[in-house]
Amino acid sequence: MSHQARVVGILKRIGAAARKRAGQNFMVDEGVLEKIGGLLPREEGLEALEIGSGLGFLTEQLESRFGRVWAVENDRKFLVYLNNRFAESPSVRVIGEDILDYAKEGLGEVSDRPAGVVCVGNIPYQISSPILDLLIAHRKRWRDVVMTVQRDFAARLAARPPGRNTGSLPIWMSLHARIDVICNLGPEVFFPRPKVESSVIRIHFFDEPLLEPEPLAAVRLAVRAAFSRRRKTISNALSGGMTGLDKPVWSGILSHCGIAENRRPETLRLEEWMALGRSFSEIKPSKIA
């Protein structure tokens, strides 16, 4: 029986349906599921955290590769099915929580795995950014991260500044990790078929961010302000997007960094954002709204 037929049968049996609002599209292509499983390292003691296990098709791949799989799922009907499906499995532990809430609570037992944890999941577009913040917050935990996300979102993440795809999130991620697009996936890989294409990405977190904590926090404030007004010049965008500093102060900061005031935010290289963060941090950005 194909995975698509299994999905239809399981949903009918448990009285559930894929929720469009929640971005529930089940990956049903066996070859793609095997490829994703094969991307993950296999080392003694290594364990896996799956975000949004759905009906457990990828969980089955992880079960055969890892001694422990933490399958996180928040949908109540799917949760009952997963608990029954993996009731006899010695390696799968089903976690019935929203992954964002689970992360705020410290990731439970997942937070204390000496060999590290691989993180994998098919992530709905509407929670992609919060998931990335989660991954960054717990970056020392991950041995590897492989995610399936919407294709245009993957392209933006993988594009290093400068460029048209540059924004606050790609710059923020570039300070913490390298992101590679492994492959693109058509709608036929999923059921129900989404209206968009997807990509499998791999996130390689650096041992440490590229900046110290204070300039790192300063860059985040600056890029958020700048790209909230991305059609303006960098000087006008920063002074208009952040209260507490007027334009002459920003002019001085930009001049100190060798950045012309009339440039647009998307033209700045990563190294220039880093220089701006260092200069900005010297005026105590924690006091800036």
Image: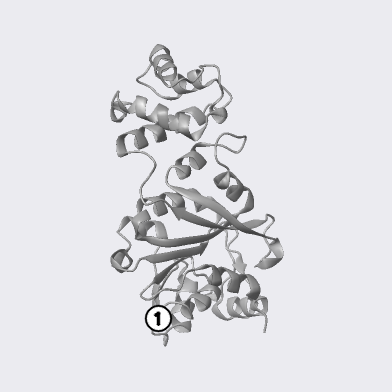
**45 left or right, relative to 190:** left
From the viewer's perspective, is 30 left or right of 77? right
Look at the picture and state if 243 lies above or below 75: above
**Dot 1 lies on which element?**
loop
Quadrant into which the N terminus falls: bottom right
**Label 1 crowd bin: few (<14), some (14–19), many (20+), radius 10 Å:** some
Colouring mode (rainbow / by chain / secondary structure / one colour)? one colour
Please give the residue where the numbered disc 1 appears in the rendered image.
Answer: 91
Q: Quadrant of the C terminus?
A: top left
Examine the rendered structure and indicate whether residue 91 appears above or below residue 167.
below
> Residue 209: x, y in percent?
38, 44
Q: Nearer the viewer, residue 62 or 174?
A: 174
Residue 203 in percent (x, y) is at: 49, 55
Q: Give whichever of 129, 222 is nearer the camera.
A: 222
In this picture, residue 87 sits left or right of residue 262 = left
Q: Does the rendering let one see residue 58?
A: yes
Query: Which residue is at 55% across, 46% downward?
Result: 157
Q: Quadrant of residue 119?
A: bottom left
- The mark total stands at 1
Residue located 42% across and 70% down the image:
48
- Residue at x 59% of width, y 48% of height: 153
Q: Position of residue 42 (x, y in %)?
A: 45, 73
